[in-house]
Amino acid sequence: MTEIRRRPGDGTGGLRQGTATFEALREQAVALRREGLSRREIRDRLAVHNNDILNRLLEGEPPPEWTKRPNAKDDLRARARELRLQGMTYDQIQLELGCSKSSISLWVRDLPKPERRRSPEEASAIAKRGWERTLQLRDTERSRIKEQAASEIGALSDRELFVLGVGLYWAEGSKDKPYDRRERAVFVNSDPGMIGVYLAWLRLLGVEQQHVRYFLMIHESADIAEAEGFWADFVGADPSQFTKTTLKRHNPRTRRKNTGEEYRGCLAVRVLKSADLYRRIEGWWCGIVGAVSEADQQNRT
């Protein structure tokens, strides 16, 4: 009889005593599956967080119907074929349904082609409207997914913000090199969201506002005054905390895409006398890497 030994940190819930037979655990998992629970719910109910073990426990058990994502394209395919039989072109079907013409082609290519009744100009106008309709539906779906994902985060604990900030700094902050000693905390980014999270992290660490300095790096062809005003308002700092803006020379041979009203350059956030802070950040990052490596090794075994 197969046994699964449970021990703290092994991905099976961290039970501290006894053993559970695989067959008994599978019996519970199958029963919960047949009650209509999802994998996540079964995982949490049985405290089995190792995916390999969970897969073995549920092997051969189909998911409940409510967990299956509906295949909306089945309905679209049927509707596309119906419209094609009514004599519509790919462009007209795209305008009606908002799906791509490549998908329409796969769905209706066995049906007879409708007789051409429009001029090339009229067909082009319909094709343009169809593509605009497709982009509109994509934007709507993109926004829906982003809003749903954002709602899944919820409130952040101090520890979650702490770990997030370490990773954020290691991705975007300056780093010390053996050949170029730079033990100072400097963070540069053009995304206000990134800057906002980083400043919240500094406050969590107890870094006082008067120990922070800012400077802007921006292309000389941009609206520099507007960008300086935007960042000053965003971080809520005293003007004396901003040092001279660094201008990037414009190369006419390059075609920049970071232009327009939304372009406000990159803001650098520097903590004064931050050698000790930088060393701690480097140590925290090493700790995260080590913890992840250990957890991953346990999940592999």
Image: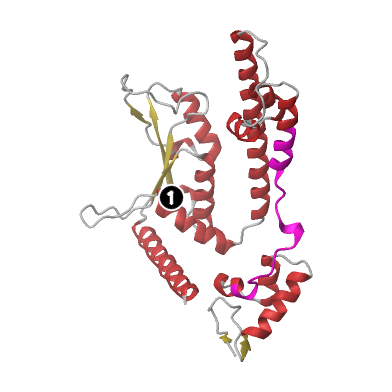
Q: Measured from the top left, where is residue 16 in percent x and y?
A: 59, 87
Dot 1 alpha-carbon crowd within 10 angstroms: few under 14, some 14 to 19, many 20 or more: few
Q: Residue furthest right?
A: 35
Towards the viewer: 273 or 183: 183
Q: 160 and 110: which one is in front?
A: 110
- The residue nearer to you, when weighing 152 against 53, is 53
Place residue 294 in its image quadrant.
Answer: bottom left
> From the viewer's perspective, is residue 257 above or below residue 53?
above
Drawn side of residue 133 relative to residue 231, left or right: right
Give the residue at x 62% y 29%: 135
Q: Quadrant of residue 3?
A: bottom right
Asked which secondary structure carries label 1, the reply is: helix
Give how far across and how far down residue 30 sits, in percent: 71, 75
Magenta segment: does it hold 102?
A: no
Q: Is residue 19 visible?
A: yes
| Residue at image coords 61%, 61% | 157
Task: Say which residue label 1 marks.
Answer: 211
Residue 27 is situated, as x and y percent measured from the top left of the image, at: 71, 80
Q: Relative to 27, is 219 above or below?
A: above
Residue occupying the point 50% across, 45% down: 194
What segment is highlighted magenta in the picture? 56-79
Q: How is the image coloured?
A: secondary structure
Image quarter hosting the N terminus = bottom right
Q: Relative to 106, is 73 on the left or the right?
A: right
Q: Is residue 271 visible?
A: no
Q: Specify whether residue 61 is painted magenta.
A: yes
Which amino acid lies under the numbered mark 1 shown in the image of this protein?
His
